Image (spheres, rainbow, N blue to C red):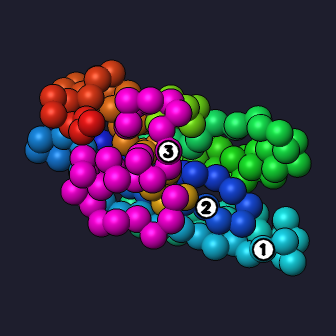
Amino acid sequence: MAKERVLGIDPGTQVVGWGVVESGAHGPIYVASGVWKLGDSRRSVPERLARLRKELVLVLDAWNPTRVAVESAFFGNNARSALRIGEARGVVLCSAGERGIPLVELAPAMVKKRVAGSGAARKEQVARLLTAQLSCPVFATEDESDAIAVALCAYLDGDTPSFRGKIPPGARIQ
């Protein structure tokens, strides 16, 4: 059976988290993760989006994911921030589409609920639970842990026969 490998992306236009999980003998395993620092507001948005595309292509080429997962747009109080995140998401969607890689969008609250048991879980709690669930290193930033959480949820919701739509026994740590 082919190995399932999911690349999760926590989009942004200044910092972007990415993470890869794949199928292992006993369930999902952590493979790699990191952050891309695209620059602050002194750099133009087009420059930052071009850098995102460059970094994303490198990771797509390096890890050859079978699926890409990205957090869906969150509409908070700041419409400008939502627009900027949407632009970054567009780069991710286009890059996956060009390569013919299936893409799934996941709501942030659903990801938190799936990993931590509550859609209102704090980011620190999600990161701590991921570290325990996947035996991975401590994450450098919340963007990195968010990306791994997105990848894990997409993996668990995928077509992997033994994990279709459910967290494997013992995977959730409360």
Q: What's the amino acid at mark 1?
A: Asp
Q: Magenta stretch: residue 115 in it?
A: yes
Quarter of the picture holding the N terminus: top left
Q: Magenta stretch: residue 116 in it?
A: yes
Q: Residue at x 48, y 38 (%)?
A: 121
Task: Tell me the mark number nearer the camera, choosing from 3 and 1.
Answer: 3
Q: Name the residue under label 1.
A: 40
Q: Mark 3 points at which residue?
A: 122
Magenta highlight range: 113-142
Q: Which residue is drawn at 11% across and 44% down?
A: 25
Q: Is residue 130 visible?
A: yes
Measure the alpha-carbon separation of dots 2 and 1. Answer: 12 Å
Measure the alpha-carbon separation of dots 3 and 1. Answer: 25 Å
Q: Which of marks 3 and 1 is nearer the N terminus?
A: 1
- Judging depth in this view, the residue of 125 and 112 nearest the camera is 125
Q: Which of marks 2 and 1 is nearer the N terminus?
A: 2
Q: Is 43 located above or below residue 98 in the figure?
A: below
Q: What's the amino acid at mark 3?
A: Arg
Q: Residue at x 53, y 33 (%)?
A: 120
Q: Is 144 located above or below residue 129 in the figure?
A: below
Identity of the residue furthest to the left in this view: 25
Image location of residue 135, percent across then percent down: 22, 57
Measure the alpha-carbon separation of dots 2 and 3. Answer: 19 Å
Mark 3, residues whose alpha carbon is within 10 Å: few (<14), some, or many (≥20)? few
Taking 117 as reference, is 17 left or right?
A: right
Q: Mark 2 points at which residue?
A: 16
Image location of residue 96, percent across then percent down: 58, 47
Mark 1: secondary structure: loop
CB contact under 8 Å: marks 2 and 1:
no
- Judging depth in this view, the residue of 33 and 170 nearest the camera is 170
Task: Tell me the mark number nearer the camera, choosing from 2 and 3.
Answer: 3
Identity of the residue furthest to the top in this view: 165
